[in-house]
Amino acid sequence: MIVFGLAYVFVKGIKDRTQLLLLFSLGILILVFSFFVIGGFEGMPYAVLSLGVFTLAILYFFLKKYVIGKKILFIGVPLIIAIHIFIGFINQVDYRVVDKERLTDDETGNYIEKIEKDTSIVGYKKFKGGEGEDFLLISMGGERKGNTIEVLKVKEDSEKTIICIRTSYNKNPEPNPYIAVALTRIKSKVVILDTDGTNYGDGLFD
């Protein structure tokens, strides 16, 4: 909202052609920033913002002759984007990474032993946790030996829980790298996406 408000104040006193050039330039700068400075899933909101700026420029090209149209444009587009951001916010799921030292119950311990012996096991398994939180134990498989796992964010839609992770090589001694993530709610379908595009969503779900 602030970006679009500043854009309106800044460009309203400039010639139409220059206004379009400035808006497209702003969109390109935000897009480059989202991909090359932030990167990964964390840069996606900025990429969406750049798309909004491009849309604003295109609509402005067709509505520039209409004063009322321009005013509606600079209010309506930011409002739509604000609603989109709000929907994304309410779809976020509270989560926490469970300390591996606390995974001491028999069921979890047996499963950890299983994935360490059978490093072909990739995906997730659901366990009952305390304090009303269930947790997923996510394993990457033996091909990822030496990697550590970081949870970037968790969100959901009407059908599935989406866990966004990042793996990086850090000499992790685990034969089958894993992480336990406690969630306030879990949909019947779970998708686990790595920043490199790997989908670990196909796994065990009890």
Image (tube, helix red, strand yellow):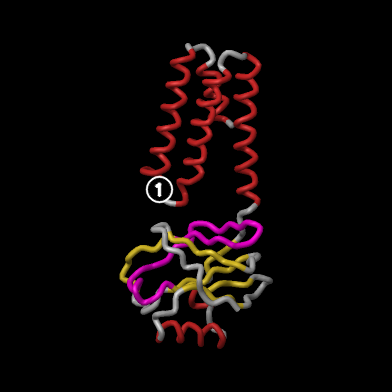
> Against 174, is 164 above or below?
above
Quadrant position of the C terminus in the picture:
bottom right
For the record, the magenta segment spans 140-165
Give me the residue at 52% from left, 20% from top: 61
Residue under numbered circle 1: 39
Give me the residue at 62% from left, 42% from top: 84
Residue 111 is inside the magenta segment: no
Give me the residue at 42% from left, 57% from top: 195
Residue 99 visible? The answer is no
Quadrant position of the N terminus in the picture:
top right
Quarter of the image for residue 143 reads bottom left
From the top left corner, tell me how far across and down residue 35 is, in percent: 39, 44
Label 1 crowd (10 A; few <14 / some 14-19 / many >=20): some
Q: In the structure shown, which secondary structural element does the residue marked by tag 1 occupy?
A: loop
As drawn, is 40 to the left or to the right of 157? left
> Residue extending furthest right?
132
Which amino acid type is marked by label 1?
Answer: Gly
As drawn, is 130 to the left or to the right of 15? right
Q: Nearer the viewer, residue 174 or 36?
A: 36
From the top left corner, tell me how far across and down residue 140 is, in percent: 42, 72
